[in-house]
Image (tube, coloured by chain):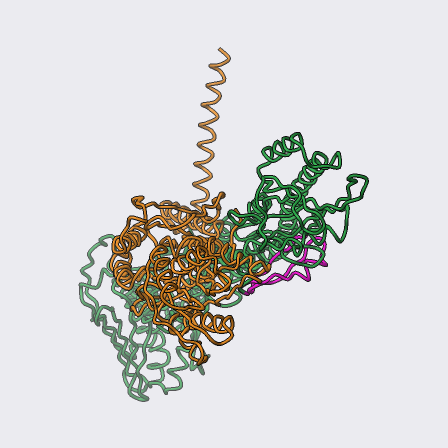
Chain colours: A green, B orange
């Protein structure tokens, strides 16, 4: 649990490659995207606004053009009617009627042609019909404007024509006060042509500015609504238009109605004094800023998620080999140099692995070399020691031999020389460091024999060993230094007759040589000094390093857990245990039935 | 020969390319250790899918909801009122982005205005039931036709109904239809136009304040008679509360004038019947003014007065805005007409329906302004727009 948590914490640390890659990737990409989005956003919305404005303007212009065109054609028609009707100062006659009928039938949007005098009396009309008295002709707007501005064709606002019976129709009245000469007198008449508003209504209604956009028409002089698709609603007060603004505006302006932004485009219609206002809802004709923003945010979120996923994937696949490396390095740290990284993964990791393997190899070889060197050094030391010891011992022994010869003790001389030669043969043992227990014991025996003679039988010795162990292997020259130690330090200065016992027995899975003497013994200090390598106060000849040397060699060769152990009591004697692993000989040595001991 | 060569080259190059791709893939796969090739493939595919999906999801703007389909059961009201209502609903449908369908229960009285241009934005559907001459239809047959039309509208997937019910019974049946035949478990709102009925399950009533309208009529009559005279009420069997309320309003207003005697209400259902009724009344007693509670009664009374040429002597205050009534008003046969604003009724009705469908605040009762027009002011610009709602 804790370990997992810790490792997770470690892996999510800010400095981890994974973290760096993931977040730098994400931040960078999102930053780039955001900047792009911002740059594009303005440009985009501006362009959208411009194009929306342009579109509505074009539409409104088109409507305006159509209306103007219509108005122009109606004006032409009016002039034609006027021409035909009043050319000769009279409106009577079949020809006039015929022409008027032709004109009427040519244009279905003419509802009526009416000629009145200035008092409102009907002079002539087409189609012929009764004038309603209840219509109060003289009070109608078109009549008054014709009187007010004579000789000027005026267009009325759309209104209900109520002069004739029949269905009420919305019309635009074209009227003009005309002065004609009749019977030498000037006479003012008013020619009224009512055109159906339907055509204009349709022109305006057909316009589509987005889903809900529309155009409405106002009258420039007074700001009356000429046409509005929802004039009913305006009348009910459910809807209102900002006519004041439309009146003074030219071009486009934005306003707000019911919380919705609208683009108004204004265009005047020539000859009739009307103004067309195109209303387009911005949210329909262009993607609004919020929409763009929302879109961009969505894009960013998706990209971010993707980037995080991808970079997590990437970084983990990058760091996995690195983490593996780390594990291997830890192993190396713990001292296991037998590791090898597989050569795979990204190129850099591959290279690193290769380098690492090389390095570990190098270390391994160096370590081997060092161990080898150390061993060499030890061997050389040993050899040097032996080389040191042996001449000394040889000198002593030979001295004894000379003494014996002087005393003509030939038997003993022979024994001694024989032992000496045997001794040397075993210590040389063809340069091997490992010999059989049998040889080692024989070596000890010869040594003891020589020393016994030298010390004039001051001590006895016994060597006991189980036959089963005789063919096991041991490091050579283990016993001799210890025995020498026992003789030189333990027995030489002892008053009584000394005894040295060498036993070989098994303890658990170890082989034990026990060397016991009944010499002077040692203090605790001396004992610990023996193995710690401090030079001990020497009490006689000998290297003083020998015992330690034995211990070290055993440890070096067989590892920890083997080596020497001392137990000693002053004036009682000393016991040394030498523990080595039981190692059988690979090759069956020659059986040797020789018995040790005396 | 050259062809063969080329072919061989082609094949070779294909192979080479293939092997390149393979080796490249191997390299890629090798650069992601610990992931099996298959897993890498699926991962790649998955991420590609994710990308594509997200891109698709992003590129398409928020899917706009299907526009609600709202049905208007026609005729709503009579003749031109019905047309005005239809125009109003149409305008509101366009504004709200709803789809308006009209289901005709039976042919409407009077001249039916059919728009020359069907607006492409608000798709229209005219569904004709069996075209029966309305004149021959009995009242109960009409009611049945109306209920059938409502059922048919629901079958066509209408999510709201706008209806001017003929009677309480018809309305109850329609509501039952609306509550049982809905497909997706939501209640189909029913909006009642021009009328009020004490029926449960109505989303909203859109009508004029009939009591107020009655008061206005009574008040106008009182002013015409300068506070004294005989006034007769004329109207059909009160099948709906609207008429009862009008009557009530008239009575309330006239009670203020002690010198005005109000005759008991005369019952007549058709134009001809009312004409006869008025004739009898005028033959039997002195009547200074008629208050006619709806169109047929108004027209019947006007017919009799026209016949007698005594239009200036007997006053009429009527209800309705049929073309003939307007003509009579212009001629001064009627002194006043109380006009229902059908356009507004339709407009507001549809707005209420949309509000209900969008789970917004709905007014249970929307009162429309009543308009009293007279011979003098009927051609004022505003009144023109009220009285003649469409261009023809």
| x then y, percent, for residue A473 | 27, 61
Q: What x and y, as percent, mark residue B264?
A: 34, 71
* Residue A338 coordinates in the image, percent (x, y): 40, 57
Can residue B305 be seen at all in this image of the molecule?
A: yes
**Total number of numbered discs in the rendering:** 0
In the image: residue A454, left or right of residue B10: left
**Residue with the most extreme bottom position:** A571
Q: Which residues are magenta?
A: A237-266
Specify whether residue A93 is painted magenta.
no
Residue B143 lies in quadrant: bottom left
- Between residue A179 and residue B245, name the one nearer to us: A179
Answer left or right for A46 relative to A239. Answer: right
Viewer-nearest residue: A554 or B162: B162
Name the residue located 48 percent from the left edge and 22 percent from the top edge.
B10
Seen at 28% across and 87% down, the residue is A572
Write down the quadrant of residue A1 in the picture. Answer: bottom left
Location of residue A305 in the rendering, given as x and y in whole percent from the top left corner = 47, 58
On screen, residue B61 versus residue A157, left or right, reads left
Q: Is residue A246 magenta?
A: yes
Vertical order, A121 against B237 (above or below): above
**Is A217 displayed left or right of A480 in the figure?**
right
> Residue placed farthest to the right in the image?
A184
Q: Is residue A307 above or below residue A534?
A: above
Q: Is residue A161 visible?
A: no
**Residue farthest top in this picture:** B1
The residue nearer to you, when weighing A238 against A392, is: A238
Q: Quadrant of residue A525?
A: bottom left
């Amino acid at each position: 649990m804790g370990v997992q948590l810790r490792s997770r914490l470690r892996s999510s640390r800010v400095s981890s490659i994974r973290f760096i890659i993931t977040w730098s990737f994400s931040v960078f990409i999102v930053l780039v995207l955001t900047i792009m989005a911002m740059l594009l956003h303005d440009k985009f919305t501006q362009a959208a606004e411009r194009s929306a404005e342009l579109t509505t303007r074009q539409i409104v212009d088109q409507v305006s053009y159509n209306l103007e065109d219509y108005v122009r054609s109606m004006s032409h028609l009016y002039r034609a009617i006027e021409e035909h009707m009043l050319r000769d100062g009279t409106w009577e006659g079949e020809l006039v009627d015929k022409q008027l009928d032709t004109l009427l039938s040519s244009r279905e949007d003419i509802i009526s042609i009416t000629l009145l005098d200035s008092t409102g009396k009907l002079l002539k009309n087409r189609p012929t019909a009764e004038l309603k008295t209840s219509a109060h002709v003289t009070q109608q707007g078109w009549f008054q404007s014709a009187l007010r501005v004579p000789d000027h064709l005026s267009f009325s606002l759309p209104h209900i024509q109520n002069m004739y019976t029949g269905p009420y129709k919305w019309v635009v009245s074209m009227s003009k006060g005309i002065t004609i000469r009749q019977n030498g007198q000037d006479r003012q008449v008013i020619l009224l042509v009512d055109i159906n508003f339907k055509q204009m209504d349709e022109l305006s209604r057909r316009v589509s500015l987005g889903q809900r956009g529309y155009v409405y028409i106002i009258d420039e002089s007074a700001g009356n609504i000429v046409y509005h698709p929802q004039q009913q609603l305006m009348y009910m007060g459910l809807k209102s238009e900002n006519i004041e603004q439309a009146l003074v505006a030219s071009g486009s302006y934005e306003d707000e109605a019911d919380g919705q932004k609208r683009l108004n485009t204004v265009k005047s219609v020539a000859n009739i004094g009307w103004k067309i206002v195109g209303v387009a809802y911005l949210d329909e004709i262009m993607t609004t800023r919020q929409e763009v923003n929302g879109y961009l945010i969505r894009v960013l979120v998706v990209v971010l998620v993707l980037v995080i996923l991808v970079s997590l994937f990437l970084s983990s696949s990058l760091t996995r080999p690195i983490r593996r490396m780390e594990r291997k390095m830890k192993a190396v740290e713990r001292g296991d140099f037998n590791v090898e990284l597989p050569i795979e993964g990204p190129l850099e990791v591959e290279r690193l692995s290769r380098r690492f393997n090389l390095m570990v190899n190098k270390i391994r070889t160096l370590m081997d070399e060092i161990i080898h060197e150390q061993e060499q050094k030890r061997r050389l030391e040993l050899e040097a020691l032996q080389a040191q010891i042996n001449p000394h011992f040889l000198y002593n022994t030979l001295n004894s031999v000379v003494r014996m010869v002087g005393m003509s003790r030939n038997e003993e001389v022979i024994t001694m020389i024989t032992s000496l030669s045997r001794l040397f043969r075993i210590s040389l043992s063809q340069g091997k460091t490992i010999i059989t227990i049998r040889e080692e014991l024989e070596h000890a025996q010869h040594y003891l024999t020589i020393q016994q003679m030298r010390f004039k039988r001051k001590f006895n010795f016994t060597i006991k060993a189980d036959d089963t162990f005789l063919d096991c292997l041991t490091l050579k020259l283990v016993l001799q230094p210890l025995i020498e130690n026992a003789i030189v330090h333990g027995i030489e200065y002892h008053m009584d007759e000394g005894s040295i016992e060498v036993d070989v027995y098994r303890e658990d899975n170890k082989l034990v040589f026990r060397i016991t003497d009944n010499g002077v013994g040692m203090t605790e200090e001396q004992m610990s000094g023996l193995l710690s390598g401090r030079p001990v106060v020497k009490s006689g000849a000998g290297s003083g390093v020998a015992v330690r040397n034995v211990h070290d060699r055993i440890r070096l060769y067989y590892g920890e857990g083997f080596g020497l152990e001392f137990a000693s009591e002053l004036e009682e004697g000393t016991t040394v245990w030498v523990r080595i692993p039981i190692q059988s000989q690979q090759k069956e040595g020659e059986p040797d039935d020789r018995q040790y001991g005396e | 020969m050259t062809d063969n060569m080329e072919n061989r080259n082609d094949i070779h190059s294909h192979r080479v390319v293939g092997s390149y791709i393979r080796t490249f893939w191997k390299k890629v796969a090798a650069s992601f250790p610990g992931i099996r090739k298959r897993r890498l493939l699926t991962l790649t595919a998955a991420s590609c899918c994710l990308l594509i999906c997200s891109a698709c999801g992003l590129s398409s703007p928020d899917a706009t909801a299907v526009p609600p389909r709202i049905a208007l059961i026609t005729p709503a009201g009579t003749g031109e009122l019905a047309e005005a209502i239809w125009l109003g609903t149409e305008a509101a449908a366009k504004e709200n982005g709803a789809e308006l369908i009209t289901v005709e229960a039976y042919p409407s009285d009077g001249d039916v205005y059919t728009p020359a241009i069907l607006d492409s934005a608000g798709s229209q559907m005219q569904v004709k039931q069996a075209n029966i001459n309305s004149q021959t239809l009995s009242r109960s047959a009409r009611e049945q036709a109306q209920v059938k039309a409502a059922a048919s509208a629901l079958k066509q997937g209408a999510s709201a109904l706008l209806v001017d019910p003929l009677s309480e019974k018809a309305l109850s049946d329609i509501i039952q239809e609306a509550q049982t035949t809905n497909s997706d478990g939501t209640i189909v709102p029913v909006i009642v136009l021009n009328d009020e009925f004490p029926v449960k399950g109505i989303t909203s009533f859109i009508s004029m304040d009939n009591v107020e309208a009655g008061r206005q009529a009574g008040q106008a009559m009182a002013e015409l008679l300068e506070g004294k005279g005989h006034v007769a009420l004329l109207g059909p069997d009160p099948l709906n509360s609207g008429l009862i309320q009008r009557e009530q309003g008239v009575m309330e207003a006239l009670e203020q004038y002690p010198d005005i005697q109000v005759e008991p209400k005369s019952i007549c259902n058709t134009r001809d019947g009312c004409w006869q009724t008025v004739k009898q009344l005028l033959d039997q007693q002195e009547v200074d003014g008629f208050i006619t509670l709806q169109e047929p009664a108004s027209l019947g009374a006007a017919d009799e007065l026209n016949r007698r040429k005594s239009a200036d002597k007997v006053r009429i205050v009527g209800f309705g805005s049929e073309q003939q009534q307007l003509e009579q008003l212009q001629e001064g046969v009627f002194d006043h007409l109380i006009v229902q604003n059908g356009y507004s009724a339709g407009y507001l009705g549809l707005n209420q329906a949309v509000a209900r469908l969008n789970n917004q605040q709905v007014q249970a009762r929307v009162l429309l302004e009543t308009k009293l027009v007279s011979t003098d002011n009927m051609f004022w610009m505003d009144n023109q727009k009220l009285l003649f709602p469409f261009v023809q």
